[in-house]
Amino acid sequence: MGTIINEEDIIKTFQPNEQRLAKQYALAWKTKEREEEKAFYNYDKAKKLYKVGYTIKEIAEKLRVHKSTVYWWVVKNARPRVGAKKLAQITRIPQSNINGWFYGTNRFGKKPKPRLLHTIDALKKKNLLPLRLNMNQKIRWLARVCGFMFGDGYLGGKLDKFKLSGDIDSLKQLKKGFLKHTREEGKITIKRKTGFIEGRQITGTSTDLELGSCVLARYLNALGVPKGNKTIAKFEFPYWVKRNKEVLREFCRGLLWTELSAPKISKGTSFGAVRFSMTKRRFVKEHILFLEEIRSELHKFGIETTPIKEFKKDHFGFHIKNNGLNMLKLYEELPPIYCKDKERTFKKAVEKLKEMRKITSYNDFLKKQEEKVKQYHKVMELRDMHGWSDSELPGAKAPSVS
């Protein structure tokens, strides 16, 4: 199956100087392996020649190596070692870098490696790289999380951390998902915050799931999640979620329910207005295209929406068309996720709608409509056969499709 994300995508999230450092490391490592292989070949040959009577000087001349090197091999039994100075001369990479990579250690006791390569290694160990379409469970979960991050998430500008905001139950659910799929355990925090909206002081609490993983932060960025303040950041609809309808479904669920207003039944079987909106202060034209993409993808699931508009300053979005059956299709095609309070409210409204319509699901409604259509056509056949007038068929009305 197709690859969604690979090493090249991760590399692009790093600055050019870090990319250059990683290339130098790869060159130095490859050179080190080649030179060590050559040294061990000479080492084995020197030992054999020494055993059959060759002198150190003769061996050095035959193998074209220094006499002291041969002495350490055959007399002191020292194994070959390619030094940092030699590698620096061959590769033209600073000797201090090579010393740090191959001959020094960091404070954790491991040989240091450029951050870019460390990130790639860590993602491979977590089975996140490469990411392929056939990794069903994992890719659907990632699609949900990415959708959520576009809505109620924040990816640090330095790609060193990220957080997801929501109700405590939803965050616990997200935390379990991260532990299962990435082996990273986030921390749920509750903070009291004070701010100002239109000149009025507002005090409340913020509940967040925080993860200080720079590895996952870069991974999410490579998947298309924008970094920094989303209201002034330029971003696009992730191309990869459209390659599979089930992956697209999960992304839309994750995004839609973070920004969708709570529903209610207004009159009869009609829903009140349900709005999807996002705040945008810069790159507004690009954001309108992003919203149009969302509307287009929702249409693939049979969900109808109104045109995009600016509801108030810097707030752009659209309404889900508020006929009850459209709302029922939304609820069944893109079930609520990571929004416990909103899910309860929507479920209550949907159950009321089903009771009023005397249906159990959207498909049940379609079956009943199909039966009504069959009955209508049967009556029309009888009318034509017997020459009845329309006044003699008071119940023969074409069934409604809404």
Image (cartoon, grey):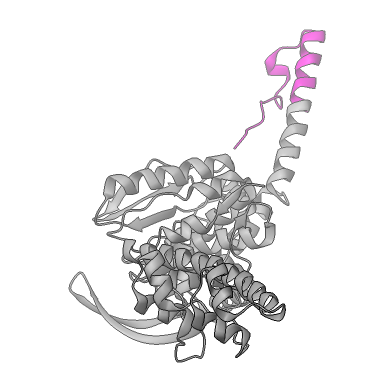
How far across and down, in percent of the image, does residue 197 sit? 24, 72
In the image, is 285 to the left or to the right of 260?
left
- Report if residue 392 lies within the magenta region: yes
> In this picture, which residue range is highlighted in magenta?
375-402
In the image, is 104 to the left or to the right of 279?
right
Q: Image height check: is 41 above or below 83?
A: above
What residue is shown at x 40% (from left), y 61% (from top)?
Answer: 13
Q: Residue 115: in sight, yes or no?
A: yes
- In the picture, the quarter occupied by the C terminus is top right
Q: Image height check: is 6 above or below 366?
A: below
Q: Quadrant of residue 292?
A: top left
How far across and down, in percent of the image, does residue 131 sit? 60, 57
In the image, is 139 to the left or to the right of 65?
right
Give the camera-side residue of 47 and 11: 47
What residue is shown at x 58% (from left), y 44% (from top)?
Answer: 243
Give the camera-side residue of 43 and 37: 43
Residue farthest toward the left in the current orientation of the protein: 199
How far across and down, in percent of the image, does residue 4 sit? 56, 52
Q: Quadrant of residue 234?
A: bottom left
Q: Quadrant of residue 157?
A: bottom left
- Report if residue 208 lies within the magenta region: no
Q: How many discs mark residues in the rendered view?
A: 0
Q: Residue 263: in sight, yes or no?
A: no
What residue is shown at x 30% (from left), y 60% (from top)?
Answer: 231
How far across and down, in percent of the image, does residue 217 sit? 45, 70
